[in-house]
Image (cartoon, grey):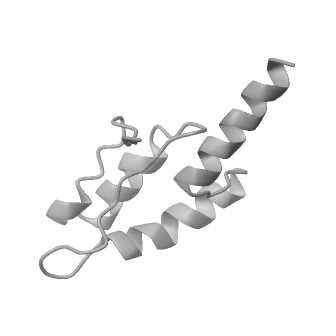
Amino acid sequence: MTVLWSWHHPTDDWARPGVNHIVKGILGDVRSGDIVLLHDYVSGKTQTIDALRVILPKLTEEGYRFVTVSEMLHLKNSKTNMVNR
């Protein structure tokens, strides 16, 4: 199965654009069910980890949960099966 990420999050974290740019790229247009692509390694000092220190608590405060893609697909399939019964 091919899984893509939500294109409307311009984080550009791989280019080290600054923590605020990464944070705004995610928090500026977050939606339920989004898959956010971030890079865990970039050449030089990463800014992604510092951005996540802002992003994760804020999204948690807003009621978001973080799940794996497998969990998301299972939840989606469970809801679809419940509707089709």
- The residue drawn where x is 30% and y is 52% is 11
Q: Position of residue 17 (x, y in %)?
A: 20, 61
Q: Quick one: quadrant of the N terminus?
A: top left
In the picture, measured across the screen, residue 70 lies left or right of residue 62, that is left
- 63 or 7: which is nearer to us? 7
Total numbered circles: 0
- 21 or 84: which is nearer to us? 84
- In the displayed structure, 33 sits above or below 63; it is above
Q: Quick one: quadrant of the C terminus?
A: top right
Q: Position of residue 31 (x, y in %)?
A: 55, 36
- The residue drawn where x is 13% and y is 81% is 44
- 67 or 85: which is nearer to us? 85
- The residue drawn where x is 36% and y is 47% is 25
Q: Position of residue 53 (x, y in %)?
A: 49, 73
- The residue drawn where x is 57% and y is 39% is 33
Q: Residue furthest top?
A: 84
Q: Residue furthest bottom?
A: 45
Using the rendered image of the protein, determine whether residue 63 is visible from the camera's viewpoint.
yes
In the picture, measured across the screen, residue 45 lies left or right of residue 73, that is left
Using the rendered image of the protein, determine whether residue 17 is visible from the camera's viewpoint.
no
Q: Position of residue 54 (x, y in %)?
A: 50, 67
In the picture, measured across the screen, residue 57 lies left or right of residue 55, that is right
- In the displayed structure, 23 sits above or below 83; it is below
- Hey, which quadrant is residue 13 in on the image? bottom left
- Hey, which quadrant is residue 16 in on the image? bottom left
